[in-house]
Image (cartoon, rainbow, N blue to C red):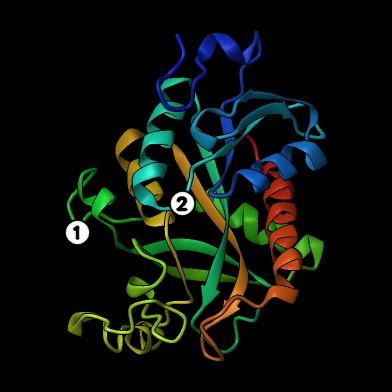
Amino acid sequence: MALYHISFGREDLGSNPPTTALLSGDPERAFRIAETYLGEARLLSDHRGLNSYIGLLPNGVPILSATSGMGAPSLSIVVNELFQVGIRRILRVGTTGSIQPHVRAGSVVISSAALCRQGAADDIAPVEYPAAADPFLTVALARAARELGVEHHVGITASVDTFYEGQERVDTSANPNVLRRLRGVTDEYRRLNILNYEMECGTLFKMAGVYGFAAGCVCGVIAQRTAAESVVAEQKATAVDNAIRVAIRALMNSAG
């Protein structure tokens, strides 16, 4: 039976169903992964813009390239339903803004854990529950980045609900009036050695712990917040391509 939001079920995955999914916020990225990197790729569903594709890694292992949508609430729905159809390993391939001067646009951040400031995650587990990536996936991602010669950084990510206010954007936002509790939060996170902002991995990691699946996250750095709030357009394609290549290589290198 097809699940309500992703609009496919176990029976649509064939006789050798995948247990791993690459999860992108952007449906165009999910399509690019399927079209460029997967063999025998076909569309499973484009319901609600949550495009999902099934295909084969270069080593013949079946895999999904799925879309989570933007933000943790949408991701939580998709991940719940992917788990119901048998997915037991999820690797988020996203984009991110660096808050450290040494984490440059065009590089990738591999999240080992998240400072999780997300309402959706609070519905999954208590605030104190750790939002940690699977250590084996994290090591596989770092190894893949080294093998590919991709500049990479492994560390803690601030996973927050909003792109503008929650990431203390005031110059590029329609609302320059950031709440008092968020004023200076970027500097505070920088002093805590947090590498970057993004909007999904904290909830993904908590769901992995509660549900019992492996989760990882690699994001291409498309903004350097120590320089400016805006996306570095000329580095976006490189950053996204680096994140995808690292994710594919990591899955090729790792079992499961």
Identify the residue at horizontal 27%, vertical 87% (top origin). Answer: 183
Identify the residue at horizontal 59%, vertical 56% (top origin). Answer: 139
Quadrant including the N terminus: top left
Which is nearer the eye, 81 or 60?
Answer: 81
Task: Give the left or right position of residue 19, taking residue 172 as reference.
Answer: right
How far across and down, in percent of the image, does residue 105 sit? 66, 78
Q: Secondary structure at mark 1?
A: loop
| In front: label 1 or label 2 | 2
Amino acid found under the numbered disc labelled 2? Met
**Residue labelled with disc 1:** 128
How far across and down, in percent of the image, does residue 226 sit? 52, 90
Q: Residues within 10 Å of mark 1 (few under 14, many from 20)?
A: few
Task: Give the left or right position of residue 174, taking residue 97 as reference.
Answer: left
> Which of the 4 quarters of the picture holds residue 194?
bottom left
Identify the residue at horizontal 61%, vertical 71% (top origin). Answer: 221
> Which of the 4 quarters of the picture holds residue 156?
bottom left
Amino acid found under the numbered disc labelled 1? Glu
Identify the residue at horizontal 66%, vertical 48% (top origin). Answer: 29
Q: Secondary structure at mark 2?
A: loop
Q: Residues within 10 Å of mark 2 (few under 14, many from 20)?
A: some
> Which of the 4 quarters of the picture holds residue 22?
top right
Residue 175's disc is: none
How far across and down, in percent of the image, does residue 207 sit? 34, 42
Residue 252 seen anywhere in this rendered image of the structure: no
Measured Cα–Cα span from mark 1 to mark 2: 24 Å
For marks 1 and 2, the one nearer the N-term is 2
Tell me: residue 232, above or below residue 218. below
Q: Are marks 1 and 2 in contact (CB under 8 Å)?
A: no
Tell me: residue 140, above or below residue 20. below
Tell me: residue 225, above or below residue 145. below
**Residue labelled with disc 2:** 70
Which is nearer the eye, 124 or 43?
Answer: 43
